[in-house]
Image: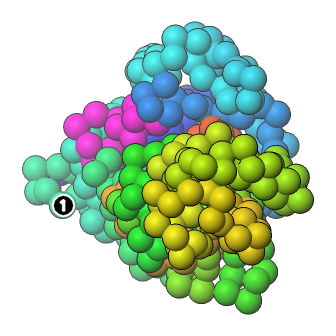
């Protein structure tokens, strides 16, 4: 096998890896090589935001980050805002009313092209279809082994690990990197799928399949403790709940499993007493109509029927005036607290990001490994994940910048 020497190797040609390569190239004139297992870099990036690439959020809310939140604060305080970074790539951004930042073209390809063109302009080597199966520390740097004898062994003076996590394995992030990291005696916190649908044992979802409704969804432990609430569009599947509000609760479902319940409030902006007054009044107005029509002025009819059936002893074609006061009060409780016991979150295939990873105590403030002084980390591989809305890509850009600058600066201090 041939051996290829480079100053800085970056494992991972995704958002964090490309940002790291760009900033390392801007920081110094050292040789940089990006190692990507797919035929082309940026496969996962192309699919983000339904192809629109929600690449940041403005303003930044650090409560939207989980895991090593303080590390995220520290990194953001020392790195470049996204509008400035992408302006330097020739990519114009726009921000919607919810603070979601997109490329002005509304296409993720514009983001990838900007990154790819800058990498090429900087003279960065790009090795594709290169799957790394082993990383061996050297006196100064690392030896990186491929799974294919036709590929060279890479000897790098500095190594940046930006391989992504374990989510969306069809894009190349199958979690092998964490095995290699553990082999280097570096701790990896428990991994779990995040930003994905949640499976439930409540079979009401079958009748609701395909329906979308605005709701407040809360992750509640079996002891009644509310861990988190999210408001937004809730989507029902055959045996699952989906939508952005559910995605943001998915890591809790992974962590707590069947000890967790998703409580759905279908009328989050209506207090219980006001809701009861409305339902009682509607029951009088529609007294001679079928029970199935009671809630059709408040909720989609299919939803109203599904939530009413288990509460009343009457058939749905019976008249509304047959409902008792207790049944009407029970309807209010059901609308404000419709319970879906969790089976588990969806598997890695349907997850967008990874919760867990390399913890902050394994890293310096420059994202360098405390155990291996020539090893740096960036992106999803670190124990930081965020809500929907551009937060995860923001972490990739910022951590990629710091890791790239730190690795290049380390070389410059030695060579000068």
The reply to whether the magenta stretch includes residue 206 is: no
Residue at image position (65%, 40%) is: 297
Please indicate whether residue 4 sits to the left or right of residue 46 in the image: left
For this rendering, which residue is in front, 275 or 127? 275
Instruction: Name the image quarter holding residue 308.
Output: bottom right
- In the picture as drawn, the residue positioned furthest to the front comes out as 288
Residue at image position (18%, 61%) is: 147
Residue at image position (47%, 50%) is: 302
Residue at image position (57%, 48%) is: 289
Q: Which residues are magenta?
A: 30-48
Instruction: Name the image quarter holding residue 16.
Output: top right
Secondary structure beneath dot 1 equals loop
Report the residue marked by disc 1: 147
Please indicate whether residue 84 sits to the left or right of residue 106 in the image: right
For this rendering, which residue is in front, 307 or 72? 307
Query: Can residue 367 be seen at all in this image of the molecule?
Result: no
The reply to whether the magenta stretch includes residue 43 is: yes
Q: On the rendered image, what quadrant is the N terminus found in?
A: bottom left
Query: Can residue 179 be seen at all in this image of the molecule?
Result: yes
**Rendered location of residue 122, percent (x, y):** 48, 22
For this rendering, which residue is in front, 134 or 359? 359
Measured along the vertical axis of the image, is residue 18 above or below residue 257?
A: above
């Amino acid at each position: 096998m041939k051996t290829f020497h480079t100053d800085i190797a970056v494992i991972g040609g995704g958002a964090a890896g490309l940002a790291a390569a760009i900033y390392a190239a801007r920081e110094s004139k050292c040789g940089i090589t990006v190692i990507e297992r797919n035929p082309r870099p940026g496969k996962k990036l192309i699919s983000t935001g339904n192809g629109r690439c929600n690449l940041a959020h403005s303003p930044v809310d650090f409560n939207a980050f989980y895991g090593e939140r303080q590390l995220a604060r520290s990194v953001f305080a020392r790195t470049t805002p996204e509008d400035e970074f992408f302006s330097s790539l020739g990519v114009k951004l726009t921000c919607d009313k919810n603070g979601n930042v997109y490329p002005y073209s509304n296409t993720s390809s514009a983001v990838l092209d900007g990154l790819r063109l800058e990498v090429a302009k900087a003279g960065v080597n790009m090795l594709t279809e290169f799957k790394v199966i082993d990383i061996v520390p050297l006196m100064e740097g690392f030896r990186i082994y491929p799974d294919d004898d036709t590929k060279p062994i890479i000897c790098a003076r500095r190594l940046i690990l930006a391989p992504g996590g374990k989510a969306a394995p069809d894009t190349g992030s199958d979690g092998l990197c964490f095995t290699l990291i553990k082999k280097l005696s570096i701790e990896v916190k428990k991994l779990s799928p995040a930003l994905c649908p949640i499976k439930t044992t409540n079979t009401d979802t079958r009748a609701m399949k395909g329906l979308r409704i605005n709701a407040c969804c809360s992750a509640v432990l079996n002891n009644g403790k509310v861990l988190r609430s999210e408001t937004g569009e809730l989507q029902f599947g055959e045996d699952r709940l989906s939508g952005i509000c559910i995605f943001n609760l998915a890591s809790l479902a992974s962590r707590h499993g069947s000890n967790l319940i998703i409580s759905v409030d279908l009328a989050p902006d209506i207090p219980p007493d006001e809701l009861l007054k409305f339902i009682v009044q509607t029951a009088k107005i529609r007294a001679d109509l079928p029970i199935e029509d009671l809630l059709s002025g408040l909720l989609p009819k299919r939803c109203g029927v599904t939530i009413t059936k288990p509460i009343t002893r009457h058939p749905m074609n019976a008249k509304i005036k047959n409902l008792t006061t207790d049944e009407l009060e029970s309807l209010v409780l059901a609308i404000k607290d419709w319970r879906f016991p969790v089976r588990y979150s969806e598997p890695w295939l349907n997850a967008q990001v990874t919760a867990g990873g390399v913890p902050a105590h394994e890293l310096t403030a420059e994202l360098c490994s405390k155990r291996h002084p020539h090893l740096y980390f960036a992106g999803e591989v670190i124990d930081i994940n965020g809500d929907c809305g551009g937060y995860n890509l923001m972490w990739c850009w910022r951590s990629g910048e710091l890791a790239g600058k730190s690795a290049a600066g380390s070389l410059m201090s030695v060579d000068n």
